[in-house]
Image: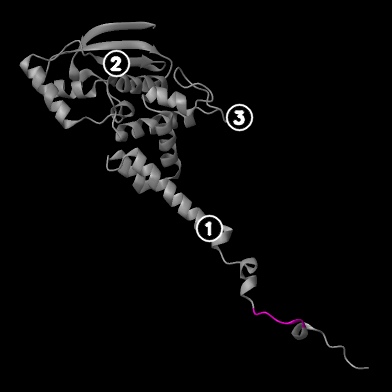
Amino acid sequence: MKNTKLDEMKPTEIITDPAFEDLFPIDPELLKRIEQDMQNGTYDRSQHIILGKWVGQHEPMLMDGHTRLRAAINLNLESVPVFIKDEFASKEEAILHAIKLQCNRRNLTDAELFRCWQTVDELKVQDRDPATGRFTGTQDCTPGKSAEKTAELLGTSPTKVSQMRRIGNQADPETKKAVLKGEKTVNQAYNETRKKRNAAKEVNSPAGKSSPQTNLMQWPRYSLKDLSLRVPRQ
């Protein structure tokens, strides 16, 4: 760690960014419970809102604690406890750290997992070396990163990461939206996508198409006599 410190800040002065905010949309039920705890004085102030700074970002940016911040703003609180981490080499590294914090704290839904996987995958694509095609990496993303490394970051299994990759690369837009909305699980979307791909392969395979070779046996048969050539008389 470089520099970390505890502080108090006015909620309305905390800077937010959609890159972090959209990772984990606020749950209305959880927001309501936190507001009640804050009103009743039973809120645990050791649960700090976490801010971060990185190269090029001089003002602390909200990384973790969006629901707590929203509750404090709704209740017009004068200040909230914050923990400022000044240790990131890049915004991408800070995003990966924010994902890891959430994954370590609770079990993510399939919708949240898929959204996080998309973010991690986008960071990998953006950080590829155009000359070699390899991922250059940051603190949590090393060159040649595998499903096992992504699974470790997200707190899930390599198999589930592979399923999400299949969905991300091969599923239709409607299926992806259904996963993000929580209407389909990752396993359901994966199986549906695999079946559709297999069905398409069967239709487009040579065995499924008509060709001169496959139709030879359907042609009329002739005897040798019918096919013999007659030599014209001199």
Is 11 on the left-hand or right-hand side of 138? left
Name the magenta segment's main secondary structure: loop
Nearer to us of marks 2 and 1 is 1
Residue assigned mark 2 = 51
Relative to 4, is 7 on the left or the right? left
Label 3 environment density (alpha carbons within 10 Å; few <14, some 14–19, many ≥20): few
**Kind of residue at badge 2:** Leu
Q: What element carries label 2?
A: strand
Where in the figure is residue 108, as x and y percent of width and height? Answer: 29, 28
Q: In the image, which disc is placed on residue 204? A: 1
- Say which mark, if any, is on residue 131: 3
**On screen, 209 above or below 182?**
below
Q: Residue 87, relative to residue 184: is it above or below?
A: above
Check disc 1 and give the amino acid type.
Asn
Residue 184: % across, % down: 30, 42
- Residue 134 placed where, x, y %? 56, 28
Colour convention of the picture: one colour
Question: Range of the magenta residues?
Answer: 220-224
